[in-house]
Image (spheres, helix red, strand yellow):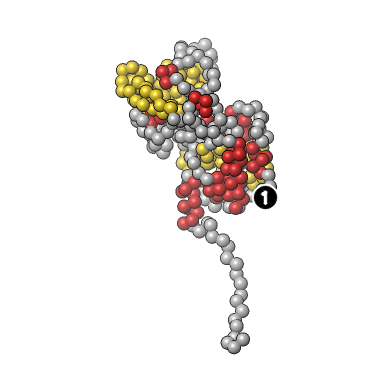
Amino acid sequence: MSTVGIIVNPHAGKDIRRLVSAAGHTSDSVKIGIMRRVIAGVIEQGAERVLLSTDTHHLAERSAEGLGGNIEFVESPCTGSHHDTVAAARQMWKQQVGAVVVLGGDGTCRDVATGWPGAPLIALSTGTNNVYPSTVDGTTAGVAAALVATNAIAVEVVARQSKRVVLAIHEPSVATIEHDHALVEAALIGTAFVGARAVSDPASIRWVVACIANPASTGLASIAGRVHPVDRNAPGGVLIRLGPRGRRVRVPLAPGSFATLDVESVEPLADGIAVDLPGGGVLAYDGERNTPVSGDATISVSIERSGPHLIDVDATLAFAAHNHLFDHPAICTTARKVPHGD
């Protein structure tokens, strides 16, 4: 059964950065409207089933009200945390969903990739940091997802596998090695606590490794983007070490909020080549503090092309148009000939 999955993070676009910066607010009603347009596009393009993940704000159920089609739900743990997104992605992987539309920011997309590393993905921006996802109308996203899910267009024709920043954390006091990843950037923040997760103190940033470094981005990725741009589809990434012996750069660490950072060194990183970096703080993934590490820890970091298969919506619709996939089936009729004089 051709299936499109939809995962929404009800908390994306609502965190503490709204109190300390000019970050916008993405309301529940906006997310519901996007989801309803996605569902309409999916049904229009002929996917047999829409699979929605439930959430603590009941956005999935509310978005499906009054719509036709075969709409089903996968139950979320409803913890109100990133575990809900991870679990939803894992369930959709098990149910062999043909394409997934995700509403959230960089952190939400990372959670999807944790649950389903190679997901065929369309990422819609509804978060604070939106380097990985893009702004696409929900209707168009639904049509593109259905074209892939129904195999009208093979996913490898219109999607490229994303890069990831892959980390192996070596703590001398722990026998096991912890592995983690980011879809945009990983950074070490010189603080002892995860706290509210957002990174607001520029002086606390020790190093940043980015696999996408866009100078137009906001957040930690903007540090790399403004000193050494790296395209999402280009090989490799970049390591930025912060310190007093280098250039000074102005960056937007939060929407509408700028800071001056001292960049000590800039080191391009090739695919698959690991570099060992010091610990002593909290590791942040895709803009959010996550994992405390001791000063004795060593973090081995590399850039790998092992992330989700990100579907290019524009390329998908262009391919469909060139191959007449939007043409309506012709209705054959036999015209009655009218004799002259009738």
Helix, strand or loop for disc 1 = loop
Q: How many marks?
A: 1
* Disc 1: CA contacts within 10 A as few (<14), some (14-19) or many (>=20): few
The residue lying toward the viewer, choosing from 112 and 124, is: 124
The residue sitting at the bottom extreme is 341
For image coordinates 50% across by 14% down, the residue present is: 192
Residue bearing the label numbered 1: 68
Judge left or right: residue 174 versus residue 185: right
Q: Quadrant of residue 165?
A: top left
Q: Position of residue 185 (x, y in %)?
A: 45, 28
For image coordinates 66% across by 30% down, the residue present is: 78
Q: Position of residue 322 (x, y in %)?
A: 46, 56
Residue type at mark 1? Gly
The residue lying toward the viewer, choosing from 174 and 35, is: 35
Q: Is residue 312 visible?
A: yes
Q: Is residue 69 above or below residue 259?
A: below
Q: Position of residue 75 (x, y in %)?
A: 68, 35
For image coordinates 64% across by 47% down, the residue present is: 49
Q: Is residue 3 visible?
A: no
The residue lying toward the viewer, choosing from 192 and 92, is: 192
Q: Is residue 200 above or below residue 98?
A: above
The residue sitting at the left extreme is 246
For image coordinates 61% across by 86% down, the residue present is: 342
